[in-house]
Image (spheres, helix red, strand yellow):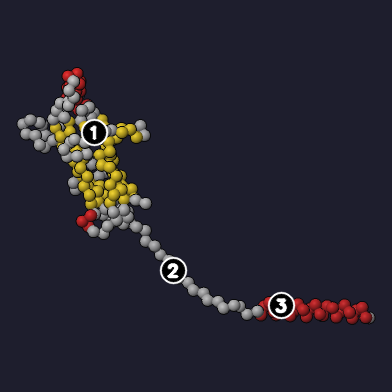
Amino acid sequence: MKYGKMMKGIGVAALALTVVSSCIVGGTPAKYTTTATGNGSAVVAKWAPSFKNGNDEFSDSTTVLLEDTSVNANRLKAQTIAPGTKGNFDIVVSRGDTEVAFDFSVTISDLANCPKNLKFYSDSSYTTEINPETVDGKTIYKVIANTTMDADADPTTGAKTGHVYWQWPFESSAAEEASKAAWDNDDNAAGTAADADRKMTFKINCTATQVQ
């Protein structure tokens, strides 16, 4: 009897302890708490630079014609080049609605049937020749080096014009007669080639890259 009462008492005490513990855990008041929510947003800066030759935007169908408009009409057929001619063409880069600063550059590559003595220059006086470079196995001329266009809202700074100068010198500047003879032979070869081989073609590569 005593043992049974003892076990019964222990069971009642355990049950009571469990109830009390549950009340303490479940009824403990929380610390001060405040919650709030907000919203976030961002606008991606617009990217919209463009390149133009005059009013025409560059595309795969754009063709820039090299021609000398300074010579007398009776000395050279229109829209052709020959030894002694020179000229330039413009490339206009526009920021448009672009909202970041960027660098732009222009290269010429994939030259076909180019007269051997035709040269590109970086200045209007035709004194600083642009030497060809080999990039990824391809010959290129960097006719407009990296130039920065700032992210400026002022429309007067929203476009820049780069000038590409070319010249086919009439004769060699070298003093040696042998060099002059070779120069003349190259000019003659260009002028006496078949019609298809007298058509010079090249690629104009315009690149705009965001400034980090």
| Percent of width and height locating residue 135 | 34, 35
Residue 54 in the image, given as x and y percentages of width and height: 18, 46
Q: Three-letter amino acid code at disc 1?
A: Thr
Pick whichever, 1 or 115, lies toward us: 115
The residue to which callout 2 is attached is 39
User: Mark 3 — residue?
Assistant: 22
Kindly state the secondary structure of the residue where label 3 is placed: helix
Residue at figure coordinates x 11%, y 37% from the top left: 69
- Residue 68 at least partly seen: yes
Q: CA distance from mark 2 to mark 1?
A: 56 Å
Q: Residues within 10 Å of mark 2 (few under 14, many from 20)?
A: few
Q: Amino acid at mark 3?
A: Ser
How far apart are the two marked residues, 2 and 3, measured between alpha carbons?
Answer: 40 Å
For the question of whether residue 57 can be seen, the reply is: no
Residue at figure coordinates x 68%, y 77% from the top left: 25
Q: Which mark is residue 73?
A: none
Above or below, 163 relative to 185: below
Q: Which amino acid, mark 2? A: Asn
Left of 174 or right of it: where is 151?
right
Q: Which residue occupies 24% across, 48% down?
A: 93
